[in-house]
Image (cartoon, coloured by chain):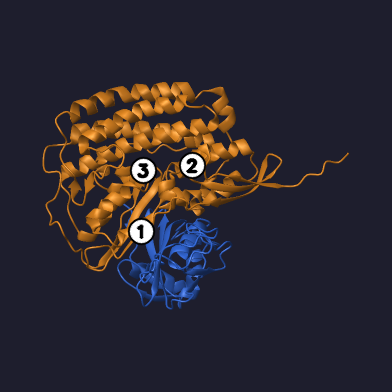
Chain colours: A orange, B blue
Amino acid sequence: MALNTQPVTINIGPHHPSTHGVFRMRVTFDGENIQDMEMVVGYLHRGTEKLAEERQYTQVITLTDRLDYVASMTNNQAFVLSCEQLLHMQVPERGMYLRVIAAELQRIASHLIGIGFFLQDLGAFATPVMYCFRERERILDLFEMLCGARVTVSYMRIGGVFADTPDDFWPAYRRLLDDLPNYIDELDRLLSTNEILLIRTKNVAILDPAQAINGSITGPVLRSTGVAWDLRKANPYDVYDRLKFDVPVGAVGDNYDRFAIRLAEIRQSLRMLQQCAIQIEPGPVRATMEMLFRPPPGEAYVPIESPKGELGFYLVSDGSIAPYRCHVRAPSYINLSLLKEMLVGWKLADMIVTFGSIDINMGEVDR
Amino acid sequence: MTTAVSGQDLADILRQRLPEAVVASDDVAVLVRVDSIVAVCSFLQGNPEQDFKLLNSITSVDYIDHFELVYRITSLDHNASAVLKLRVVGRDEPTVPSVSSVWAGANLQEREVYDLMGIHFSGHPNLKRVFLWEGFQGHPLRRDYLEPPLPYTWPQGG
């Protein structure tokens, strides 16, 4: 007897534990196989770009914290770099080093979240996340020493950083740098050769390099396909040109590579943090400037390598105290461009894993 | 460092191949005619000497008397970046051709520009609102947008 079958459309999200926030997918299934996918976003849209048009440049820094809220430091950095280009401003060296230290610590914290929740999506419930959170906690403690806040930091200022480090920062920083490599090795041993993880992620949802570039994909997702494109190397900002590091790339571009590249990048970040601790010298951390300033009319865009990909603020100044236009080039949002292409043909269980491997943040997707 | 290809240099290259496409150029960007943007983009993407394979971002600015669209493109092999601009006049239904046939990554970004700035993209496969809900009145990132008086009218009441 022939079975009468027809495709079924299922709604997943916005309130679903695997959607990392409020992401919704309308998926058409043929049995368990994905035929079509449509993403629905906007549940966290707060109009950041519009709000920025009504605030002074310094006040926008607090808005940027709330974009990618697990990587606030890099959001701050992208915004202040664009402002400094608009003002043609020089930043003191110690300020630039402190920014790089904060940004690399933030990259480790963000990648740990990415790895932890990726494994959570894979079914390894709670244990890997707690391993990752244990290490992230120590990084947030350092942020608390730097600026008093742990998540929405607003640490960076136009012309440098908020304040110099307190006395107890450097001993804690060195202790963290001593401990973290072992933590990461432990995580690596626990996960990278796990048979279930390998079976579930190897050769699943492969993205090829040409397709990824055409889809405007950046960051770890692009590098996992084998393209060595890292803005810290290609267009160094702050003091990245003085640091030695490699750009890890993946071989296949599957879910496993997207996971493994984040572990490899954490190791590179640790290398950079070690060098920063040696190279940094005493001095001013912030250029002096007036409280209220009016940049000359013009436009600025400085892309940076945020943990998710290329992040940049396109600022247009009309000579007033507020930006005329402030556009956020949000990597989380644009990395979703090829989600449908990655998912079609795979099964429901792979959908959750693939979505987790892109590592998006809804605060940045919806803005 | 990434080489920022100046607008003049890019304009000279474009004039050789597409003589009618360039309107003006400055240090930063080259201003392109609206109806030749797809030809310009596919030329810059496909020509190995330029090789602008990556579309970084599409965004728009409302200058009251006209809208400006800003296309930021990068060549990964040459480590070079360039900026293309378009000007479109009229506030009722400004329309520009979609470049989503050239770059798949343009799809979502053009939807965002349409949603928040109200610029239509002809030839876009799926042009509908992305952040705001269907039935929302107006386009909030326009400079003359005014918030409607409360209470809001959601489709299902509220």
| 3 or 1: tag closer to the N-terminus | 1
Image location of residue A13, percent across then percent down? 55, 44
Question: Callout 2, which amino acid?
Answer: Ile
Q: Nearer the viewer, residue A30 or A223?
A: A30
| Above or below: residue A267 compared with residue B130 | above
Of badges 2 and 3, nearer the viewer stands: 3
Name above or below for residue A186 compared with residue A216. above
Q: Of label 2 and label 3, which has the lower sequence position?
A: 3
Residue on which disc 2 sits? A358
At x 42%, y 78%, the residue is B89
Q: Residues within 10 Å of mark 1 (few under 14, many from 20)?
A: many
Q: Is residue B99 above or below residue B31?
A: above
Compared with A6, A255 (above or below) is above
- In this view of the protein, which residue sits in the foreground, B105 or B25? B105
Going by the numbered disc 1, the residue's amino acid type is Glu
Local SS, label 2: helix
Q: Is residue B24 visible?
A: yes
| Residue annotated with mark 1 | A49
**Which quadrant of the view contains residue B4?**
bottom left
**Nearer-N-terminus badge (1/2):** 1
Chain on which label 2 sits: A
Residue at the image point whose x is 38% and y is 29% from the top: A133
Residue pictured at 25% horizontal, 52% vertical: A80
- List x then y, in percent, for residue A2: 86, 41
| Front position in the image: A338 or A207 | A338
Q: Which residue is mark 3?
A: A69
Nearer the observer, B62 or A55: A55
SS assignment at label 1: helix
At x 50%, y 30%, the residue is: A119
